[in-house]
Image (cartoon, coloured by chain):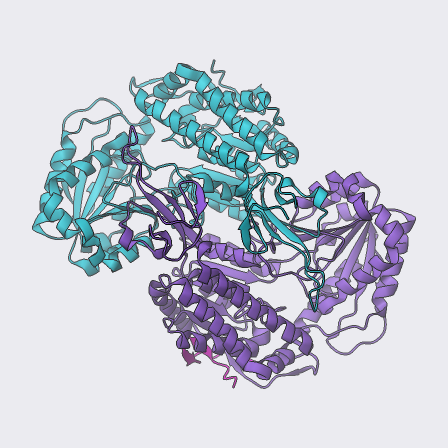
Chain colours: A cyan, B purple
Amino acid sequence: MITGKNYLGNQLSAKGSITYKTFNPQLNIENESVFIEANSEEINQAVTIATSAFKSFRNISGKRKAEFLNAIADEILALDDKLITTYCSETGLPEGRARGERGRTIGQLRSFANLVEEGSWVEATIDTSQPKRKPQPKPDIRKMNIPLGPVVVFGASNFPLAYSTAGGDTAAALAAGCPVIIKSHPMHAGTGELVASAIVKAAEKTGMPNGVFSNLNSSGIEVGQQLVSHPEVKAVGFTGSIHGGRALLDLAAKRDEPIPVFAEMGSINPVVILPNALQNRNESIAKTYASSITLGTGQFCTNPGLILGIKSKSLADFIQNLSDEIVKIEPSCMLHPNIIGAYETNKQHALAQTNLSVTADYGRNVQTNYAKQAITTVEGKTFLENSTLHQEVFGPFSLVVQCENENQLEQIISQLEGQLTGTVISDGNEVADYPKIISALQNRVGRIIFNGVPTGVEVCPSMVHGGPYPSSTDSRFTAVGIHSIKRWVRPFSYQQWPNTLLPDELKNENPLDISRLVNGEQTSAQI
Amino acid sequence: MITGKNYLGNQLSAKGSITYKTFNPQLNIENESVFIEANSEEINQAVTIATSAFKSFRNISGKRKAEFLNAIADEILALDDKLITTYCSETGLPEGRARGERGRTIGQLRSFANLVEEGSWVEATIDTSQPKRKPQPKPDIRKMNIPLGPVVVFGASNFPLAYSTAGGDTAAALAAGCPVIIKSHPMHAGTGELVASAIVKAAEKTGMPNGVFSNLNSSGIEVGQQLVSHPEVKAVGFTGSIHGGRALLDLAAKRDEPIPVFAEMGSINPVVILPNALQNRNESIAKTYASSITLGTGQFCTNPGLILGIKSKSLADFIQNLSDEIVKIEPSCMLHPNIIGAYETNKQHALAQTNLSVTADYGRNVQTNYAKQAITTVEGKTFLENSTLHQEVFGPFSLVVQCENENQLEQIISQLEGQLTGTVISDGNEVADYPKIISALQNRVGRIIFNGVPTGVEVCPSMVHGGPYPSSTDSRFTAVGIHSIKRWVRPFSYQQWPNTLLPDELKNENPLDISRLVNGEQTSAQI
């Protein structure tokens, strides 16, 4: 049952006066449930109970946190078809995608459960004392990662499950020992409430302190602003637009105590197609990219919005092939009228730029809220001179840049803003002949892909989802994979602390049997 | 020979018109050398050559970076007495301190050399492909840490060697593969230039690209501001005042591309003395702390500026003992007339607060630039109500707070700003009876010390030098120890990248024989 209320810990609350509904873009109608935006009192209450919960939550064992995370996964699965149908009605996305994303969300929760149950993630580092060292004795010092405090997570419009209420940010923060307050995304508030109910149930079943999780409804920007400004909030996770992410970053930077904001924002994900690949695999590359550009109606932060090649007959053929292929694909629904509105506006703005040619623009009529894909092309010089062309058009849109030569290609890559991904399409070892291109690309992105597509972010320890600004606000961290837990922790040292009072991770006996760096050697031995 | 010029890579340059001299506080006279502040053109030049150097420096092997770092250590030692006498003449510090700090600086350089020569620090993480996985095949993904780009390091007033030109920030950034531009501290510009000459010589001897290191003189704030604002600068390291660090943080946050600022700032380093310890070891604790408070004329960021106890006869006795002990200690010289000026101003401001008692104020005449130590005391209630009393008085000064009871002690700790350290003085296992106090303290500091003093920062992997704001701007990193290298790197993923083109750290053959996380298992095996 969707109540439309906020979860303040395990209490439902609806004291606010602003209400809103979600929208079914496939049917082009509002959904029934009415959501009540959290008011100022409720926001403060959520932070107060999170701060209180932190006092105990930050000290509970990895084993118990694992139980909590696994219970969340179980409770989400128990929501069953109710969750899937709500998800579809609030996004216009197909059921297969809903089930796939749920699987990914469950997988993320369980992978963090495994991580904290095993326990070595705290990076325990121990240097034992040398009482006889000259001129001064060396003290015993022991370090491990501890949680930062209450974290605010903003739900993402394009991933109602995997990057929202119980998504990667939440799973990582809870695993770290940080209570989480969700600023629910208004476009899928029902999905969010259902998932929140699962988390609250899991917290109660596994005996977590009340306040370890809250879910706040919000239709505008005020709830998020108040949360990020609250002195007891210690970090922020966000996935969304550059505009939104930067506003939160600026707000956090202006606090008396600035706090880290990990925002994963826009990206046009440059794809470099090398000459021999263009020559020898032109049609298959075009087919692959027509599919990647339109996947999920282009609503992925890894969508390939920029394709770079060196001017040639093959590149011209490729543009034609890509254009032919992309108009064959049936248009699909976008998440919300606002999203399709922004897509059409941004697309038209791009199309209106001087010296830009439109090579494919789906011309037939489409259903309301369905996006028409487009392919455009410019010369390298035009691209270099017009920074509007560097901006993301969120949706099934891509720009092919025809560079004069290798130097111009390198120059263009070097002048790009930071990106999540860069891709190189190469005919065999052709890539080895372009070290400068690869080096320039590496300096602008967080992940580089060989002969593939940037869409499809594998959830595994080796994944980097993040990159130089503005693809993310702090390239030193990834938003995906177990190492994303590092965003929510800080190292902490105990000096000459009595062994019996140390946390288990640092005790001589190594009761958790974790791997530790002891006097410079990685070992799970006792001391 | 001290030229007073800037090092732009390996070129000496003096195009600016602003000049200044350093000062000998022991003799109370200016030193002879004239330093020429870098002008705007020189600042840009330093960044341009750093950016160019980064293109090759970021790809050189750990073995070669180790040669470079070891060569810097060798060249610093080769400066011999010239460096020591210059250091002493610019700081008023004794020769023993100069030699000790040089040893620490050399040790830091060599420990980073060892770290990058061994190579596992890049945290190589590999997930091999599963081509037959359903529904989608799993790609091969491999991750490692790569350098951010050119880094600006601000020399610290109180550590002309260990936290300045070739100090911890520089050693860590060079080890990471980031070129370094030093904003030299004006108070020890000669020491800085000598060390810079050693780095430049080492870079040439080991074949590093020109621009990998530059040293810019500056007497005011403009050079630093221009450096932090430069688009090609990618990170900042700073050790100094809260005022200065916050200004740089704000400047970096306002850039089109915000960059990380790692500033290690002020701290009053609370010390909690538990009742039984006060009862049983009153005099010895007083003696130890009189010495810690005056060590280095109190010019350490870990100086114990705040002592907390529960009101009792023992605490009153302790205040008396501490006061008696501290006036027995001979006053010593501060670094610079500006520093002693600030100490006297801040001390008088603290002394003027309502309901504060001065229990020790060194009354006799002292030499010019020598600091008079002081001990003061207030009731817990007064401390809670007056945030002026929470502010650092940089120098040989400490405030003893007499708390009503355990609850008030906990409340005071919880309301403190973030601190580098917290110390607990306990009679045996007494500490076990105060879990709330310890928990509150842990939440406010980066390092917690049992029965010791906060001064003396051991350089080892388990050290955390940093803490919640404002002790540092990002508590997620330490400024001391090998793990401080993490401030200057970002993770980077290669997806389906050809084995022969991968960096050695990620190749199947594991040619560097480093420990890697391969398919979830930490191993140095080949793939």
Which residue is drawn at the image coordinates 46% and 58% (left, top)?
Answer: B235
Picture coordinates of residue A255 (x, y %)? 56, 46
Residue B414 appears in the figure: no
Pick the front one: B238 or B445: B445
- Residue B163: in magenta span: no
> From which residue to which does the magenta span run?
B1-21
Which residue is drawn at the image coordinates 63% and 45% (left, top)?
Answer: A506
Picture coordinates of residue A210 (x, y %)? 62, 26
Q: Is residue A405 left or right of residue B440?
A: left
What type of secondary structure mainly makes up the magenta span?
Answer: loop
Pick the front one: B465 or A262: B465
Residue ranking furthest to the right = B313
Pick the front one: B120 or A2: B120
- Residue B12: in magenta span: yes
The answer to whether B25 is drawn above or below residue B377 in the figure is: below
Pick the front one: A435 or A309: A435
